[in-house]
Amino acid sequence: MSALIQATSINLTFRPPNRGPVRALQDFALDVGEGEFLSIVGPSGCGKSSFLSVLLGLIKPDSGDLTLRGKPVTGPGNDRAMVFQDFGLLPWRTIQHNVELGLELKGVPKRPRHETSQRFIEMVGLRGFEGHYPHELSGGMKQRVGLARALATDPDVLLMDEPFAALDAQTRDLMQVELLRIWQEARKTVLFVTHQIEEAIYLSDRVMVMTARPGRAKRTFMIPLPRPRDYEMRTTPAFNDLKLAIWNELKDEIKI
């Protein structure tokens, strides 16, 4: 598997006004292969989301090297798309027009824009809801719209920052199953941030554990569970052994 993303010695410090500096990342490093699903887990405030912002090109690190397909990441680009925790849908736009937003900003003409949005709306299971508005949808459906919007721009990398955190437990489990189905169809490279170890194991090829702030890569676990994965896999000894191993690596970083 070729490396698509490479981060080496990333250092990032925030300097809020009237407060001392906050070091978010220290010598952070990772690599992500083409088509890989990699999850990052770590304690609150360890810099997981900050690294996604660096990779998205919204924040410039103090030092370090970050490349995508061998080229330095210097700002936002069409090769990356983000799926947010809070859905981020525009309430005055229909579902179809929300999905088309990124294509519109890229200057894609109306007809191909419509065809593309229809394809991804169908992929996420929302055919028939094109004319609805966000307030008419459940939380899980809103997150599907956010996923369709991100995929419609055909990014190389899909960044997901705790996308299911706002959902109830049952909807979250169903969205995990749906995400795997969509990922297996779209075959995008995914970098997924979560606090849930079970979620990370179920979805991922590898799981990285980060240290407490300043965030560093502590240990990365291979997830050798076969694909396609079903929900019942969570009850197997292999799954529970991985869960315990990752928890043992993570628990010392959590401060109460």
Image (tube, grey):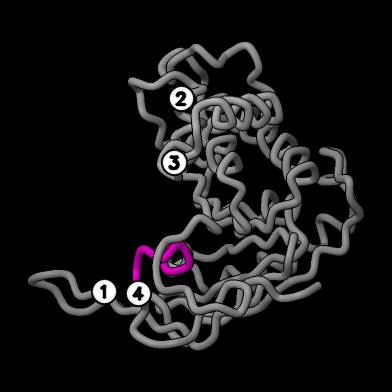
Residue 13 image-quadrant placement:
bottom left
Q: Counting residues from the N terminus, which is met first, the one under dot 4 or under dot 2?
A: 4
Instruction: Point out the frontmost of discs 3 and 1.
Output: 3
Looking at numbered disc 1 in the image, what kind of residue is underneath it? Phe
Residue 56 on the magenta span = yes
Q: Nearer the viewer, mark 4 or mark 1?
A: 4
Q: Quadrant of the C terminus?
A: bottom left
Q: CA distance from mark 4 to mark 1?
A: 11 Å
What residue is drawn where x is 67% and y is 49%?
Answer: 199
Q: Residues within 10 Å of mark 1 (few under 14, many from 20)?
A: some
Which residue is under mark 1? 14
Q: Residues within 10 Å of mark 4 (few under 14, many from 20)?
A: some
As drawn, which residue projects farthest toward the left?
18
User: Can you identify the residue that label 2 sits on?
Assistant: 97
Q: Which mark is residue 60?
A: 4
Q: State the image coordinates of residue 74 (x, y, percent, origin top left).
A: 41, 73
Check disc 2: other Cα within 10 Å, few if <14, some if 14-19, many if 20+: many
Q: CA distance from mark 3 to mark 4?
A: 27 Å
Question: Which residue range is magenta in the image?
Answer: 53-59
